[in-house]
Image (spheres, coloured by chain):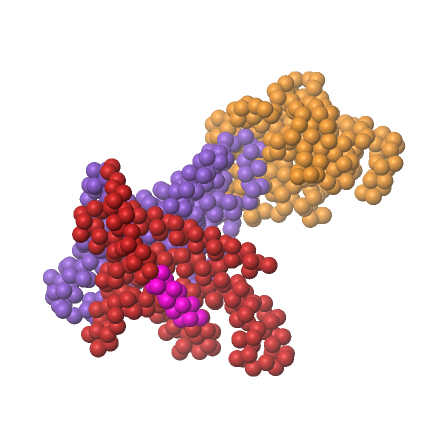
Chain colours: A orange, B purple, C red
């Protein structure tokens, strides 16, 4: 449980710069359809800076779609999305890229670049996108690899790593951009069961020791209970219930939530 | 065969090699520019690149050569030296086939890789240069190897225009000796050896490019036969 | 750039005559390449190196050397050996032979794509080898190979002008003749260039339609 450890800035390997406090992400009346299938239905919600929000619900209920909309991998059919005061859609390519720099994402299938070494996977974007010097980027990457426990894998290629190791590299890669927001899209779903704990430990550590804002789609309910400030329960493209984890997991209001939780816990 | 005739054949080999190198370079440039354009997000760019591919693949390489030799000078006043005329006709035609290879290989890269690039705020150009091409290029080598052999065979067409390549020197020797079996056998063998060297070289390149990416080198040792032939002398071969 | 429509209309009768020859070469060449390619593909499955090695070597050689030089070889060498064919027959045979080395690869892939279980079932039913091939394997392979064979027919179309090098007057040969007689190069050459694009485009549309029908 996080309560017994206070953030200790002195030993933090990766302390993200404090974002502005208050509202960081806002979705208003967001609708997304795939063909005749409405995945998000006039959705409203907002996330404050530094909060850890977990999205739960049955598959197909639109959780992943929200992360993909925020990462601009998808465009909404209706509604507006604002990140740190800047609106996405409609926005120029340049504006969109500026917003993207504030957001990092870790994918279910890792999406490491197989043509690059582990180190280069992490340093490439800080150098080409943020304009860091090579040395700075390498130093940053090594610190992060140390944090995820893979300091010795710098020169390996992704294909030589286990799934759990690849996912930890992917986390380091996302953090190397020092994003304000970290999107975690079912990051343990593609892993063999014995590798899940290592990845979740890294994420718990990040949640505890940084003030990065996290949006997390997961089926790991214990993990969600540990790290979340707020849990959103999705069903059929709507948020049907939300609240602090203690409330949602122990005493949900709705039968639908209770039903879902009893099925997954 | 006298040594003078052998010299003629060697000169022909040299012209064929020059033409092959020049048209392969032009063809590669066309392949990448048009192939990448065919994956562009603006439909008009995709459309124009598609028209280019259809037109240059649709026509015959030999007709193209005739056009460059006879119509360009008359219609536009561009009189090209034979080597450049041959290079232009062959490079533009085979480049159209090559653009299909480039497009196919780019489309075959896992779309999740593109998303990974977007999540790291790369620009489209950076995604292409850093992520897509490094993964796609090794996959292009086997079909490009086939196309290169087709291009080598295509270079013989310039002999019809009287350019002194290997096939043309074969005709000269036939006229000199009034005997054809020997010289044409020699000429065919020389083409075969060049094709063999090209295929070997491309296979070496494939191994080199795939080394270190952690990917297996795709084909079995018996590649040449197992690989589906993707490039007829023409043809929208799947 | 000057464009003379009267040259176009003057060339049209020659174009039709040439087109007829082009299509003739294409149809006969295709038939030869389909048949010969199947022979190569079947021979390559004979379980003896004494058969597969020479067949493999010869077809590899033919596939990797220029069709144009092969045309010259057949056109000039065969008469020296006392075998004489017309230029058109020589051209058709050379094209058919050249493309058979491609179609054999198509057949091979098609045959290999028939599931092993089909062979096993035929063995279990004690079908003789001949029946297994004719009744079981080839009918299944053919459906798979039609699109690829069609693509090679389109490729072959674009190689038919090569036979003008051995005096056959197909479309390009007609255009060259007309150009030299009337000293007008632009129009006839452009017309046949467009003709090739149109024919191969129509052929690829037809092939796609055929593919869709076979897919069901």
Q: Which residues are magenta?
A: C23-38
**In the displayed structure, does residue C18 sit left or right of residue A203?**
left
Q: Position of residue A170 (x, y in %)?
A: 60, 38
**Residue drawn at the location 42% of the way across and 40% of the way down:** B49
Residue A203 in view here: no
Between C173 and A84, the residue placed more toward the observer is C173
**In the displayed structure, does residue A155 sit left or right of residue C168?**
right
Q: Quadrant of the N terminus of chain B?
A: bottom left
**Residue drawn at the location 54% of the way across and 30% of the way down:** B121
**Residue drawn at the location 51% of the way across and 51% of the way down:** B215
Residue C14 in view here: yes
Between C173 and B5, the residue placed more toward the observer is C173
Residue C9 vs A203, above or below: the answer is: below
Q: Position of residue C7 (x, y in %)?
A: 24, 46
Q: Position of residue A81 (x, y in %)?
A: 65, 24
Residue B153 part of the magenta-drawn span = no
**In the displayed structure, does residue A64 sit left or right of residue B205?**
right
Residue C183 vs B190, above or below: the answer is: above
């Amino acid at each position: 449980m996080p309560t017994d450890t206070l953030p200790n800035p002195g030993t933090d390997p990766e302390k993200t710069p404090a974002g502005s406090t208050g509202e960081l992400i806002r979705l208003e009346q967001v609708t997304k359809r795939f063909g005749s299938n409405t995945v998000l239905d006039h959705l409203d919600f907002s996330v404050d800076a530094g909060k850890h929000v977990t999205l739960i619900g049955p598959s197909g209920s639109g959780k992943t779609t929200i992360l993909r909309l925020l990462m601009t991998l998808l465009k909404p059919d209706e509604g507006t999305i604002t990140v740190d005061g800047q609106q996405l859609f409609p926005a120029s390519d340049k504006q969109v890229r500026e917003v993207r720099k504030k957001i990092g994402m870790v994918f279910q299938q890792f999406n490491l670049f197989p043509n690059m070494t582990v180190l280069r996977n992490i340093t490439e974007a800080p150098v080409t996108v943020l304009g860091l010097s090579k040395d700075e980027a390498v130093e940053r990457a090594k610190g992060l690899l140390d944090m995820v426990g893979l300091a010795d894998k710098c020169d390996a290629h992704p294909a030589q790593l286990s799934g759990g190791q690849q996912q930890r590299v992917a986390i380091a890669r996302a953090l190397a951009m020092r994003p304000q927001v970290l999107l975690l899209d079912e990051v343990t779903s593609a892993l063999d069961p014995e590798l899940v704990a290592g990845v979740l430990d890294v994420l718990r550590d990040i949640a505890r020791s940084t003030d990065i804002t996290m949006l997390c789609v997961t089926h790991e309910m214990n993990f969600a209970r540990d790290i979340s400030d707020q849990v959103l329960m999705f069903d059929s493209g709507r948020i049907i219930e939300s609240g602090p984890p203690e409330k949602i997991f122990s005493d949900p209001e709705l039968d639908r939530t209770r039903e879902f939780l009893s099925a997954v816990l | 065969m006298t040594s003078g005739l052998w010299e003629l054949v060697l000169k022909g080999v040299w012209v064929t090699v020059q033409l092959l190198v020049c048209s392969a370079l032009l063809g590669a440039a066309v392949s990448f520019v048009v192939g990448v354009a065919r994956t562009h997000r603006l439909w008009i760019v995709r459309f124009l690149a598609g028209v280019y591919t259809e037109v240059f693949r649709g026509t015959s390489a030999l007709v193209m050569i005739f056009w460059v030799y006879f119509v360009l000078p008359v219609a536009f006043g561009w009189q090209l030296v034979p080597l450049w005329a041959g290079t232009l006709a062959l490079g533009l035609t085979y480049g159209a086939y090559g653009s299909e290879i480039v497009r196919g290989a780019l489309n075959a890269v896992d779309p999740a890789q593109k998303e990974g690039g977007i999540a790291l705020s790369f620009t489209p150009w950076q995604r292409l240069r850093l992520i897509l091409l490094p993964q796609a290029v090794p996959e292009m080598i086997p079909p490009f190897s086939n196309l290169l052999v087709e291009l080598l065979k295509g270079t013989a067409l310039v002999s019809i225009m009287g350019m002194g390549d290997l096939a043309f020197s074969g005709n000269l020797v036939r006229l000199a000796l009034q005997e054809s079996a020997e010289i044409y056998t020699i000429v065919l063998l020389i083409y075969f050896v060049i094709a063999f060297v090209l295929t070997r070289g491309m296979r070496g390149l494939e191994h080199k490019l795939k080394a270190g990416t952690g990917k297996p080198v795709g084909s079995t040792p018996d590649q040449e036969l197992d690989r589906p032939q993707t490039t007829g002398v023409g043809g929208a071969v799947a | 750039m000057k464009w003379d429509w009267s040259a176009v209309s003057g060339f049209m009768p020659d174009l039709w005559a040439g087109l007829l020859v082009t299509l003739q070469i294409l149809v006969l060449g295709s038939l030869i390449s389909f048949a010969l390619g199947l022979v190569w593909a079947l021979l390559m499955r004979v379980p003896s190196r004494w058969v597969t090695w020479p067949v493999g070597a010869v077809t590899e050689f033919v596939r990797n050397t220029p069709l144009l030089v092969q045309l010259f070889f057949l056109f000039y060498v065969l008469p020296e050996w006392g075998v004489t064919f017309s230029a058109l027959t020589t051209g058709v045979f050379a094209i058919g032979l050249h493309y058979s080395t491609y179609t054999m690869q198509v057949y091979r892939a098609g045959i290999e794509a028939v599931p092993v279980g089909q062979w096993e079932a035929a063995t279990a039913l004690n079908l003789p080898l001949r029946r297994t091939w004719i009744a079981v394997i080839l009918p299944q392979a053919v459906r798979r190979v039609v699109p690829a064979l069609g693509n090679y027919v389109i490729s072959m179309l674009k190689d038919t002008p090569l036979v003008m090098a051995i005096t056959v007057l197909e479309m390009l040969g007609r255009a060259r003749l007309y150009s030299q007689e009337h000293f007008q190069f632009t129009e006839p050459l452009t017309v046949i260039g467009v003709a090739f694009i149109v024919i191969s485009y129509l052929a690829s549309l037809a092939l796609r339609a055929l593919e869709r029908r076979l897919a069901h």
